[in-house]
Image (cartoon, rainbow, N blue to C red):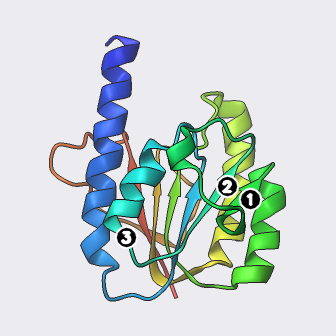
Amino acid sequence: MSRLDSFIRRMTAQRECLNAAAPQIAEMPGVILELGLGNGRTYDHMRGLFPERDIYVFERKVAAHPDCIPDDDHLFTGEVLDNLPVAAARLGRTAALVHSDIGSGRPETDVILFGQLVPLLNSMVVPGGLVLSDQKLPADDWQALPLPDGVAAERYFMYRVGA
């Protein structure tokens, strides 16, 4: 599979998982967390899916399209592991949905990152909230959810956070 085909498959999986998550959290109050802004495409899509919700974005260094950059009150710039505790102190356990797209593509690095990420997310996601990720997350107490039709196994991951 070419890198272009892989990218298209990942973006399609991402969109389908976000679209599937929207009705699952429709009646659940809470904010949205976007881990990794990139060029802002996913953030822009989430603004359309969740127009009434606050979306807080975490990005190491912002380089997104100017129309897809959140205001300063909704943007945490720097290392995600440094900023999630700051956000948790400010927001509490109020996240109905987390979307994470911060994998480095280096398994030896990612296993450490995600091992540290999961406990931080546990302190921020409401019981029953969802976490979507392009990487498998080491969260034994989260329920892995079935992927939408057309999304290949292991291409994306959807979890429901327990009580």
Residue 58 - label: 2
Q: Residue at x 53, y 74 (%)?
A: 54
Rendered image quadrant of residue 56 = bottom right
Residue 154 place in picture, x, y as percent:
37, 41
Residue 10 place in picture, x, y as percent:
36, 35
The residues tagged by marks 1 and 3 sit, at their Cα atoms, a distance apart of 19 Å
Q: Is residue 99 left or right of residue 77?
A: left
Residue 109 - label: none
Looking at marks 2 and 3 on the same chain, the residue that comes earlier in the sequence is marked by 3
Kind of residue at badge 3 = Phe
Q: Residues within 10 Å of mark 2 (few under 14, many from 20)?
A: many
- Could you say whether the residue bearing mark 2 is in a helix, strand or loop? strand
**Residue 74 in view here:** yes
Residue 93 place in picture, x, y as percent:
64, 85
Looking at marks 1 and 3 on the same chain, the residue that comes earlier in the sequence is marked by 3
Q: Which is nearer the eye, 102 or 90? A: 90
Instruction: State if disc 1 and disc 2 touch (CB < 8 Å).
Output: yes
The residues tagged by marks 2 and 1 sit, at their Cα atoms, a distance apart of 5 Å
The residues tagged by marks 2 and 3 sit, at their Cα atoms, a distance apart of 18 Å
When the figure is inspected, residue 55 is found, relative to residue 66, above or below; the finding is below
**Residue 101 in view here:** no
Looking at marks 2 and 1 on the same chain, the residue that comes earlier in the sequence is marked by 2
Residue 50 - label: 3
Q: Residue at x 66, y 28 (%)?
A: 106
Q: Which residue is mark 1?
A: 76
Kind of residue at badge 1 = Phe
Residue farthest to the front, as pictured = 67
For the N terminus, the quadrant is top left
